[in-house]
Amino acid sequence: MSLFLKYSDMWDMDLGGRDRSREIPHWFGNLAWIVIGGLCKLLFRYRVDNRQKLRAFQGASGALVICNHTSFFDVVFMYLAARPKQWVRLMGRDTLFGNAGGLLGQILSRVGAFPVKRDTADMTSIKRAVRMLKNDELVGILPEGT
């Protein structure tokens, strides 16, 4: 796998599901989990209750993970909740992926996020999420996002 993948290529790659033939490289996601998870543990002392409920889906079926979106940190904590054994494929606003000259898009894509166009019937994102669920992956949706 190449170190320099286009972030749009990663949206349709697998991440921890049943099919591992074309998978997003895990090195960046693991590094992000260690750094961000460590900082959040230190600064916010977060904890995950009922993690075993997420683990019950591992290898059995995909699942939608849905959470209120009241702050920027909701996305971070949803990502951290399933790690280190599982990945949550987060659905994010498409305009986020072009921020910071595409750097944010690269970061988000490497941890498994994919874009959704707001205020439209974005069938591409829906089909992408359905494929991920059929591949036994967790798909995270924060419906109150801005």
Image: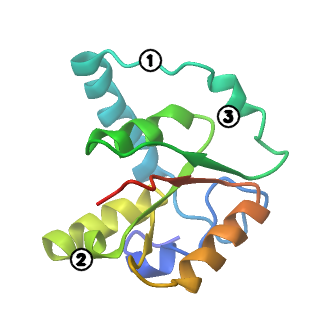
Q: In the picture shown, does residue 110 fall above or below 84?
A: below
How many numbered marks, from 0 up?
3
2 and 1 marks in contact (CB < 8 Å): no
According to the picture, the residue beneath numbered tag 1 turns out to be: 47
According to the picture, the residue beneath numbered tag 2 turns out to be: 98
According to the picture, the residue beneath numbered tag 3 turns out to be: 54
- Relative to 89, is 45 on the left or the right? left
Which disc number belongs to residue 5?
none
Please tell me in which quadrant of the rendered image residue 107 appears: bottom left
Q: State the separation of the CA atoms marked 1 and 3.
A: 14 Å
- Relative to 89, is 36 on the left or the right? left
Dot 3 crowding, Cα within 10 Å, few <14, some 14–19, many 20+: some
Please tell me in which quadrant of the rendered image residue 93 appears: bottom left
The answer, for residue 5, to whether it is visible in the render is: no
Instruction: Tell me which label, 1 or 3, sits earlier in the chain.
Output: 1
Q: Amino acid at mark 1?
A: Arg
